[in-house]
Amino acid sequence: MPELPEVEVSRRGIEPWLLEQRIERIIVRQPKLRWPVPEAIQSAVGQTIRSVRRRAKYLLIEVDTGTIILHLGMSGKLRVVAGSTPVVKHDHIDIVVHSGQCLRLNDARRFGACLWEPKGENSVLLANLGPEPLTEAFDDARLYQRSRGRTQAVKNFIMDNSNVVGVGNIYANEALFMAGIDPRRAAGKVSQKRYVLLTQAIKQVLAKAITEGGTTLKDFTQSDGNPGYFKQHLCVYGRNEAPCEVCATPIKSVVIGQRNTFYCPTCQR
């Protein structure tokens, strides 16, 4: 599943092609995605794109009358192509702009989304989201206070979007390794000092992933068609029984919250 860095890389890739462009057409070939694509999406036609933002893993294309909300789901990818580019399998939605370029959503599994939010309305999808991890609003004091009394595993705690948005499975594994915290430990049992380290680690691992171009997942490509290159730098994720890069102890794998979890039993406690 594309995580926050992949979505941010997509945002940065498509923004120069869309900003201040008038939307000429929106072509919906497959309206049955995670949620039905609303007919009201056509309200954006004729409007000028004022911004291309990201909130958590949602991409927000804002025009004067509202916002197109895009989500890549598990296998979605966005490409900016010429409007005349032949359609291939799973090309479900085109947003064609005045320049002749087209933002094309391809989603083999159809778990992605394309929704419309009229100006002045607040989407329930975005209403209860926590702070963005790469902003000052996300700090160790807030994370520590919210963890008090929590018995859930700390890995699940930092993947909860009400605590901090966008820390998906891959980067939760990596941040916990960087901070030296056992992912199975109860969130309420982690000390304040270690939440300082964890907050710093989350920021560092996500920022580095964005810089490197996102993680190479089999279903993800950037808007220019090139894969990300961060996977080669992963320390624990997907490395079950491989030697830890710090202490050479074999990396272990367990399932936490129905997700594969990787950790070093020596470095993380």
Image (cartoon, rainbow, N blue to C red):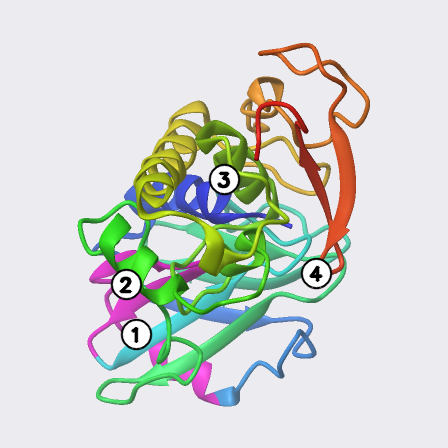
Membership of 87 in magenta stretch: no
**CA–CA distance in space, label 2 to label 4:** 44 Å
Tell me if label 2 and label 4 are in contact, CB under 8 Å.
no
Tell me if label 1 and label 2 are in contact, CB under 8 Å.
yes
In terms of image quadrants, where is residue 156?
Answer: bottom right
Residue 223 marker:
3
Select label 2 or label 3 by which is in front.
Answer: 3
**CA–CA distance in space, label 1 to label 2:** 6 Å
**CA–CA distance in space, label 4 to label 1:** 45 Å
Label 1, on which residue? 46
Task: Tell me if I can see residue 45 in this picture.
Answer: no
Under mark 1, the amino acid is: Gly
Q: What are the residue bounds of the magenta stretch?
A: 40-64
Under mark 3, the amino acid is: Ser
Who is closer to the viewer here, 18 or 54? 54
Under mark 4, the amino acid is: Gly
Classify 10 Å Cα crowding around label 3: few (below 14), some (14-19), many (20 and above). Answer: many
- Horizontally, residue 30 falls left or right of residue 121, namely right
- Image position of 118 with respect to 160: above or below: below
- Image position of 12 with respect to 99: above or below: above
Q: Earlier in the sequence, mark 1 or mark 3?
A: 1
Label 4, on which residue? 257
Name the spot of residue 205 as percent of width and height, x first: 43, 32
Residue 116 marker:
none
Label 2, on which residue? 22
Residue at 26% from the left image edge and 63% from the top image edge: 49
**CA–CA distance in space, label 3 to label 4:** 31 Å
Residue at 68% from the left image edge and 67% from the top image edge: 111
Classify 10 Å Cα crowding around label 4: few (below 14), some (14-19), many (20 and above). Answer: few
Q: Secondary structure at mark 4?
A: loop
